[in-house]
Amino acid sequence: MMNYVIKDFKTIINKMKYIDLWWYIRYTCNPYQNCEHQCIYCDARSERYHISEEFDQTIIVKNNVKEQLDRRLSKARTFLPDVVALGGVNDSYMPAEETYKNTKQVLEVLLKHQYPVSISTKSTLVLRDLELLNRIAEEAWCAIAFTITSADEEVSSFLEPRAASSEQRFLALEKIKQEYPKIQTAINLMPIVPFLEDTEENLEAILRTAHEVRVDNITFAGLTLRDQAAYFYQRIKQKYPALVEKFQALYQGQYIPQDKRYLLDLNEKVVRLCKKYSVPYRIKRRFIPSDFRRVNYLVAQHLADEAYERQLAGKYHQGYLWACNHIHNLSESLVTIAERGALETVQNVKGKIKEDVERLIKKYNKRKTLESYFG
Ligand code: SF4
């Protein structure tokens, strides 16, 4: 039986050191601690998150989230409105939300302060809040992503025992796009579990349906096995004993597959299917602030996309990633810095990257409306 414990807490919102380059998240906000969904691959079981063994048995319901967050956003001088991810090391629409409504209260405060929102979930309970999320989409920006990694319900209910079925998640995405087109929708095709989900047949079924329900993009990644590996292997052994040795041979005790060819082949397969079904595999950044960050964010998105393409192809990409991180953290516009002839003072903006940045500043500083970038 699940335990729910209501607790006072110190932190409701965290500012990340660097903006995340998958979903462009600046802040994380967790209305709960721990998670009820019990996914067997869950990375949040890793020790690096300092989460207790009661992770999927006891849910901490944070007390007074509405007042705490409102106070924090009203007083935080160093905070500028930017993308807030709800959940992160849990699903903010886990069953507890039906009773406690902490996530809904957080959304009401974010709307009041006009902060954009990014939600990743495996629960159709998010549909309850669509009107509120649509208001956030109209006044700031909102994206809802469902994690879907298997078209086979037996596999998905084994890997994610307390989440909605894959079919329910696809139907939810379809409903959102039909009724609230301003909300950006996506599928997080991650983690793609080797031997169970990396087949052409499974990936094609997901991409085909992604196209049919008109998601704006997918994001994809393979499975990482950190400290949760022991629990994962224990569960795999119960249902697919023949796979344990195969996993161990592929991972060799490390957190990613040790056969580089495996990862390159997986990337190639997903990218090819994305192209076949016209589904982008990178999010289109649509929250672009109108203050000094405007050109910086547009340039950074370009560098992040370039880094990603290089990474997929197994090429050097770290310089682009770090340039992007440092540009996101600037406290003045790249335009002003370029006018002073000081672009090289921005870390990692050197050589070819500097040439790219100069070209992009000219491109983005000229245009009058953001719509012209979005088509
Ligand atoms: S929904 Fe996410 S946080 Fe919750 S158990 Fe599953 S993987 Fe972990």
Image (cartoon, helix red, strand yellow):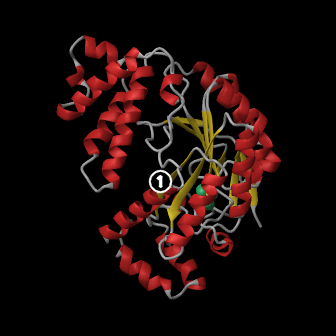
Can you identify the residue that label 1 sits on? 275
The residue that appears at 35% across and 48% down in the rendered structure is: 309
Give percent across and percent down for residue 88: 57, 48
**Quick one: label 1, few (<14), some, or many (20+) residues within 10 Å?**
few
**Quarter location, residue 42:** bottom right
The vertical placement of 373 against 337, above or below, is below
Locate residue 53 relative to residue 18 in the image: left or right: right
The vertical placement of 358 against 303, above or below, is above
The answer to whether residue 80 is visible is no
Give percent across and percent down for residue 47: 47, 60
Q: Which residue appears farthest toward the left when viewing the image? A: 351
Give percent across and percent down for residue 69: 65, 30
The residue that appears at 42% across and 28% down in the rendered structure is: 298
The residue that appears at 55% across and 71% down in the rendered structure is: 201
Front residue of this view, candidates 278 and 115: 278
Give percent across and percent down for residue 142: 63, 35
Image quadrant where one finds the N terminus: bottom right
Q: Which residue appears farthest toward the front when viewing the image? A: 276
